[in-house]
């Protein structure tokens, strides 16, 4: 029962429904209530700000009105103590126009009342009013006071009296926007008189039962607060109603959920089980041509049909992917072959001929030609290649017509072919220039060096030179031999780069060859008191190689070990490993810094060391690596760091 899909569906629906109910209830109880409260507070706050602005604006307009009245020329009559009916009638008219019980009182410079628009509102006398004005008070017996000095029209610096405007505090209520469910009132400062507090009394409702917004009033009502409020029950009645609806909906959904579970189990789960069995069968057989059963013409049936269509498209897509992968693999193989053949080309003409032949095979075209201009015809392809490396390079085009694209040849592939051909041609030009330079340099230097060496040897053998002359001639002979050795190395390096060194492979006795190398180097090692050991770990007798080239490499490494080892040992170990011959030459010399290990085979690279007076030419290691590669082997040099010796390992195929 617990493992049945019906129970799982019922449990899932129950969890979802309950979770939705609880979540919605909590959202309404907390989030939505809080959000709605915030919206109401924000709305009340905005209305309070607008009302406060109206009050301040109205006060500013009244103040402007008062200032205007104080500047009238008729006010000069205050000085003459001859205030006539004009001033009184004018002020009464303005008070009537302003309405809302606003009154005016005019005082002379000594604080004596000159006139008032309504005596009944000022009690008990005007002296108290003038004192309140003089003390800077703004509230007087239920009135808000605005006053200004009156100056003579003929002398603006002469104060002749004070004009006071009395605004009933009820006037401020005109700017409050109260409705049936919304309250608004002004809250005066705590030190206000009883009359003022009675005028602006709060509603009978408690603030805890209300949602309200309170803002402080700006000048000239500093210390006052404006409050807008609504009852919570009225404001949140939508939320309370929504909770009732949600609870009723939960009960209805629970009943519908049980009915839905039974329908789903009958009309959906059984066909899904059949479809699941079909999928397992496809997985087991890997046969995407199978057709799933169509249980009905409803949505489940449409699902089965869509699945069948998906299997058909999947089978087609897999077939296309396999075909594309096969084409890409063939293209990659063709490009690798193309790259190998191009790298083997020894001349520009051979490189171009190789390129045209391979392009003909790769494109299936019978018309591949090299011209000085690109073919613009439809269905044709032009690949630009470097033809001559000059100050202004010369380019030509390999034109291909009637392409039968059996491989995955894209524009990027053709561009890569053009770059490969151009790079090989440029390499051949550079190699030719380098070889010509080194050959010419060697020829120009070897001739005078040969003459110097021959002359020095003749003078040494003549016996006619003194002891000092003989020492000088010996140094000349040694230096000439050293320079001749460097020239020969440079020439051989150039030949190796040009591919002109052809190994003469023959059976070689490796023990004898190593022994010959040791005999040559042994006197140099004894001169520095270095031990020279040879160790053959396997039979290691006859191997196929060029003994002359291999001897040159081994002697070069042995000579380097003697040169850069002040004391200690030089060991030569020969062994066989996985069909290869391994020759390791190890010493206890000055070692090699780890950061320079990757640079050792760079041509003319030399590592300068303060603790050694010996410095090579930077040719020997580069030449040795090229020779070992010509012999089909690998060369590796390792050192743990300065002062920790070094080892060179030559690996050759057996």
Image: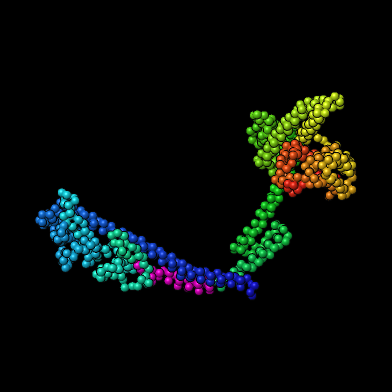
Q: Does residue 578 appear left or right of residue 43 in this picture?
A: right
Residue farthest to the front, as pictured:
467
Which span of residues is magenta-colored?
228-255
Q: Quadrant of residue 33?
A: bottom left
Name the residue at 32% across, 67% down.
183
Q: Is residue 282 above or below residue 380?
A: below
- Quadrant assignment, res 234: bottom left
Q: Is residue 141 left or right of residue 428?
A: left
Q: Is residue 232 left or right of residue 634?
A: left
Q: Is residue 243 magenta?
A: yes
Residue 51 visible within the image: no
**Residue 147 picture location, percent across and down:** 21, 58
645 to 201, vertically: above or below: above
Q: What residue do we see at 82% from left, 25% from top?
A: 455
- For the stretch drawn in magenta, the main secondary structure is helix
| 312 or 22: nearer the viewer | 22
Q: Is-magenta flag for residue 363?
A: no
Identify the residue at image location x=30%, y=62%: 222
Residue 611 place in picture, x, y as percent = 73, 43
In the image, what residue occupies the spot 61% across and 63% down? 300
**Viewer-proximal residue among 155 and 208:** 155
Image position of 255 with respect to 430: above or below: below
Q: Residue lying furthest bottom in this view? A: 1
Q: At which x and y percent is residue 121?
A: 17, 66
Position in image of residue 231 (x %, y %): 36, 70
Residue 269 in sight in this render: yes
Quadrant in the picture for residue 388? top right
Which quarter of the rendering shows the C terminus?
top right
Image quarter where the N terminus lies is: bottom right
Q: Is residue 121 above or below residue 472?
A: below
């Amino acid at each position: 029962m617990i493992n049945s899909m019906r129970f799982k569906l019922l449990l899932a629906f129950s969890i979802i429904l309950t979770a939705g109910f609880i979540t919605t209830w909590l959202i309404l109880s907390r989030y939505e209530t809080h959000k709605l409260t915030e919206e109401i507070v924000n709305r009340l706050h905005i209305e309070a700000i607008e009302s406060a602005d109206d009050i301040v604006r109205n006060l500013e307009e009244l103040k402007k009105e008062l200032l205007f009245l104080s500047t009238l020329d008729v006010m000069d009559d205050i000085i003459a103590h001859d205030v006539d009916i004009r001033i009184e009638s004018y002020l009464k008219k303005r008070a009537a126009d302003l309405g809302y019980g606003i009154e005016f009182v005019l005082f002379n410079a000594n604080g004596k009342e000159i006139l008032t628009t309504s005596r009944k509102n000022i009690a008990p006398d005007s002296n108290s009013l003038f004192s309140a004005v003089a003390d800077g008070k703004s509230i007087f017996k239920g009135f808000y006071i605005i006053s200004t000095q009156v100056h003579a029209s003929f002398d603006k610096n002469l104060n002749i009296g004070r004009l006071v405007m009395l605004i009933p505090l009820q006037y401020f209520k005109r700017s409050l926007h109260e409705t049936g469910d919304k309250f608004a009132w002004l809250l005066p400062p705590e030190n206000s008189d009883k009359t003022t507090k009675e005028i602006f009394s709060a509603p009978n409702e408690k603030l805890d039962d209300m949602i309200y917004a309170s803002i402080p009033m700006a000048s000239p009502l500093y210390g006052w607060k404006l409050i807008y409020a609504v009852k919570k029950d009225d404001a949140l009645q939508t939320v309370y109603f929504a909770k009732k609806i949600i609870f009723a909906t939960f009960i209805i959904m629970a009943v519908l959920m049980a009915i839905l579970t039974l329908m789903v189990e009958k009309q959906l789960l059984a066909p899904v089980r059949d479809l699941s069995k079909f999928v397992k069968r496809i997985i087991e057989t890997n046969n995407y041509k199978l057709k799933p059963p169509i249980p009905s013409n409803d949505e489940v049936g449409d699902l089965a049909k869509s699945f069948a269509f998906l299997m058909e498209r999947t089978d087609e897509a897999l077939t296309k992917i396999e075909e594309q992968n096969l084409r890409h693999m063939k293209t990659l193989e063709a490009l690798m072959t193309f790259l190998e053949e191009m790298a083997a080309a020894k001349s520009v003409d051979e490189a171009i001929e190789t390129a045209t032949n391979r392009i003909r095979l790769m494109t299936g075209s019978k018309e591949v030609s090299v011209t000085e201009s690109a073919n613009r015809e439809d269905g044709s392809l032009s690949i630009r290649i470097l033809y001559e490396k000059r100050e202004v390079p010369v380019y030509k085009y390999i034109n291909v017509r009637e392409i039968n694209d059996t491989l995955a040849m894209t524009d990027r592939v053709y561009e890569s072919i053009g770059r490969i051909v151009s790079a090989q041609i440029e390499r051949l030009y550079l190699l030719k220039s380098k070889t010509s330079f080194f050959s010419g340099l060697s020829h120009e230097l070897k001739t005078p060096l040969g003459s110097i060496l021959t002359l020095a040897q003749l003078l040494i053998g003549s016996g006619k030179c003194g002891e000092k002359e003989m020492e000088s001639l010996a140094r000349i002979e040694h230096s000439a031999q050293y320079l001749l050795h460097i020239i020969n190395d440079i020439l051989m390096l150039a030949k190796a780069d040009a591919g002109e060194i052809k190994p003469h492979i023959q059976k070689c006795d490796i023990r004898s060859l190593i022994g010959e190398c040791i005999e040559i180097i042994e006197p140099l090692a004894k001169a520095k008191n270095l031990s020279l050991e040879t160790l053959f770990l396997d039979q290691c007798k006859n191997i196929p190689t060029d003994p002359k080239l291999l001897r040159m490499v081994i002697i070069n490494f042995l000579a380097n070990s003697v040169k850069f080892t002040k004391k200690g040992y030089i060991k030569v170990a020969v062994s066989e490993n996985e069909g290869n011959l391994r020759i390791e030459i190890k010493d206890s010399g000055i070692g090699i810094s780890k950061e320079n290990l990757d640079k050792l085979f760079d041509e003319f690279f030399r590592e300068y060391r303060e603790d050694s007076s010996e410095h090579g030419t930077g040719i020997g290691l580069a030449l040795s690596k090229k020779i070992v590669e010509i012999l089909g082997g690998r060369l590796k040099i390792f050192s743990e760091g300065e002062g920790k010796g070094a080892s060179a390992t030559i690996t050759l195929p057996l």
